[in-house]
Amino acid sequence: MNKSSPMVIKNIKLKDDASKISKESYDVFIKNSLIQDVIKSRIDGHYENYFEVDGKGNIMSPGFVDLHAHFRDPGFTYKEDLKSGSNAAINGGFTTVVLMPNTQPAIDNPDILGNQLDRSNNLPIRLLHTGCLTQQRKGEALLDFKDFKSMIEKGCVGFSDDGDHLKDSIMIEHALRFFSGRVPLMDHAEDHLFLDEGVMNEGVVSSRLGLKGRPKDAEIRSVKQNLDIAKKTGGWIHLQHLSCGESVDLVNEAKINGVDVTSEVTPHHISYTEDQIEIHKFNSQFKVNPPLRTENDRIKCLEGLENGVIDVVATDHAPHSDIEKRNVFSDAPSGINGLENAFGVVASKIGIGKAIEKMAKNPGSIIKRISGLKIGEIRRGYIADLTMISNENWILDLDDIKSKSKNYLMNEKKNFLKGKPIMTIFGGKLIHHD
């Protein structure tokens, strides 16, 4: 097969406008890396001059888009690198991944960004890059405005000091005014002044376990600060990995009042709570930032995702080496491998159709707003980034992981995951097929 030949994928189901899966079957035509047409499947369905793929009644989604991941490259490539991270993304059905800038060196100038872009060109999926908000990601001084401008022109899709919250309101205001809605300011909303080196959610469970807590007020204060400044400036704020119910309420109120805000939640924050740390006897796989919160917080985040207050699911893929994660809970690094089972986790909570909306359509529309890239929909003229999903229950086996990191969750019981990515097409080329 010539992987760039015109292709038709026959007999597939699609998500409709109500995020339900269609009862009727469709055929999707691909030519010159674009979706050429989408028609109802024909009984006599043979098409000359097209390479034919039988979808066998499976579900076709736009390629998944992750707005928040860490590939640890440069600086920490023993954990992950651009190639291994891309392979993990493909295994999870992702065709576009946005990488955070907290590498070593940090992505804080046009030259480092340019090098990252060059190194990403020959990889099998689309890697998009963010830049730091502040010099060396120290939170002390914004990047030069001429560097912001140059990085945006090179293709930078947002700016973030992810891993840390930018506390200075004046710097946030200046950045938002300069960006003027062209790109989002993406903030890790946890004020470190309130964290006191906490390692889990502050509350009854942390007290019982004798672990120092990270209070949810650190997030709530930061979210409110960001939203107030976004309202004042008219700038675009993107709130990363929300974890508590009060944050969801604040975002809902801001949206009602016309604030330009988008937000994300992770698969683990809609699936697990702080109780897992006690149940699993201090298993550091459950150590993440922001921390897993209470059951009420989990439910509020899940409801916010379902009702549209929270726009997207982002994995916050944060790989670490096995040796690091085997450390005692307090000393182990925060973060988990999230790309390869993310869709199955989310679909098990909100259904396959809704998961497609939150992991393909909505993040694709955000990227389209920034860059003009037509991704995230199966429509004529859009880029042919596609993921085929089998409507089955499954589990991600350790041996099937493509990431360098094996520190992943959601593998405790059989048939936990719903909807398995079984084929990935990028720019009209078949790059993965189970």
Image: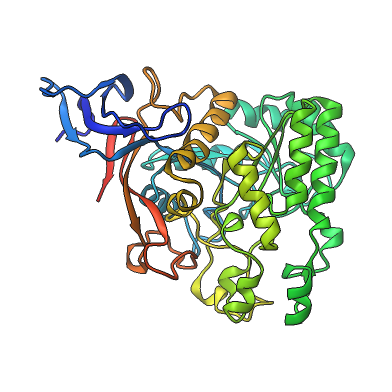
At horizontal 61% and vertical 49% (from top left) the residue drawn is 302
Mark count: 0
- The image quarter in which residue 393 lies: bottom left
Q: Quadrant of the N terminus?
A: top left
Whole-percent x and y of residue 346?
49, 50
Residue visible at 59% across and 69% down in the picture: 286
On screen, residue 99 versus residue 108, left or right, reads left
Q: Is 92 above or below relative to 238?
A: below
The relative height of residue 15 versus residue 99 in the rendered view (above or below) is: above
Where residue 75 sits, quadrant-wise, is: bottom right
Horizontal and vertical percent position of residue 223: 79, 45
Q: Quadrant of residue 152?
A: top right
In this picture, is 48 found above or below 317?
Answer: above
Whole-percent x, y for residue 414 in the image: 37, 67
Q: Residue at x 53, y 53 (%)?
A: 73
The residue located at (79%, 58%) in the rendering is 216
Residues 371 and 108: in front is 371
Give residue 71's position: percent from left, percent from top: 52, 53
Q: Judge whether residue 332 can be spotted in this image.
A: no
Q: Is residue 213 visible?
A: yes
Left or right, 220 with reference to 423: right
Locate residue 316 relative to residue 426 in the image: left or right.
right
